Image (tube, rainbow, N blue to C red):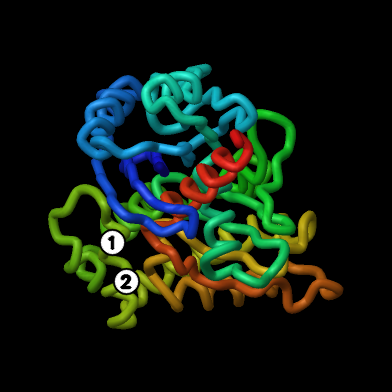
Amino acid sequence: MGIEIGGTKLQIVLGNDQPAIGERRRFDVGKAGGGEGIRKQIATALPELIGRKQISAVGVGFGGPVDWRTGKICCSHQIEGWSDFEFGQWLQKLTNAPVRIDNDANIACLAEALQGAGRGLNPVFYVTMGSGVGGGLVVDGKIYHGAVPGESEIGHVRLDKSGMIVEESCSGWAVDKKIRAAISKDPDSLLGKLIGNEMSGEARFLRKALESKDPLAKKILEETAEDIAFGLSHVTHLLHPQIIVLGGGLSLLGEVLREAVHRHLQRFVMHAFAPGPEIRLAALREDVVPIGALLLAREANAASK
């Protein structure tokens, strides 16, 4: 079994050792219910999903720092009610199976390294730009772990000395905020007309505006790509991955985002490392964390024998 717990969605899948997803349940999560609400969703969904099947192991990708050795959650930056919760123990009692838990970006990186855009390349760095900004590093087919409770937190890398961090510019909500500010000054832009009276999720209109070559959309894209590239330049100078994989909701902008990030990253990388890592879009899309969770479950199953 693989479980993804993010800032806006919960996915529970059953799969095999390949890994391949067989069955899936997807739920929206809300801040109001907090961590307890998400745990209730899991507890309610499992009996119907499992039925009479035997679960050999469970892998979990959690949207925040965790103690990967014990399954204890450090915190969630988006949903209350997770701090210091012994989630591994709770889930093991619920499933009667060994459980492994890791940060969702870490296991997404594992999935892309072994099954997706990073296959055959090493090291692989993954950055997700969605409800937050996270990162993961896989070296020689294994997740790199620093001191507990986390590592590769590119979203919290500072863009300047004032304290501005990557997540405040390059997450989905940050881009929504940029768009709202921009169209308040230019409501007659194509982007403004596409959005109309929408009050949230404005970033989903960006791709269509870019396809129509809207100058305002292009400006927002370039600003966001430049900031994520600047953050990735620190990753490059410290770790020098062979490839950087772009994932999360904003990566669905596609080639225009990939090209812009690649172009700006070349400006920030020292000459000795030029042209810098290859930049690719995530190949596994919405399956990336569930596939990573199944890979984690496979490891837990092997370790339990």
Q: Inspect this view and state whether residue 164 appears.
A: no
Q: Residue 62: horizontal and vertical position, in percent?
A: 47, 37
Q: Residue most toward the bottom?
A: 212
Label 1, secondary structure: give it.
helix
Q: Residue 96: horizontal and vertical position, in percent?
A: 42, 25
Q: Residue 191: horizontal and vertical position, in percent?
A: 25, 68
Few, some or many residues within 10 Å of mark 2 (<14, 14–19, 20+): many
Q: Residue at x 73, y 58 (%)?
A: 140
Q: Residue at x 72, y 73 (%)?
A: 276
The C terminus, quarter of image: top right
Is residue 223 depicted above or below 6 in this figure? below
Q: Residue most toward the right?
A: 272
- The answer to which image quadrant residue 202 occupies is bottom left
Q: How many numbered circles are shown?
A: 2
Disc number at residue 276?
none
- The residue at which mark 1 appears reads as 204
Q: Amino acid at mark 1?
A: Arg
Q: Inspect this view and state whether residue 36 appears.
A: yes
The N terminus, quarter of image: top left
Disc number at residue 207?
2
Q: Residue at x 24, y 41 (%)?
A: 27
Q: Is residue 132 left or right of residue 181?
A: right
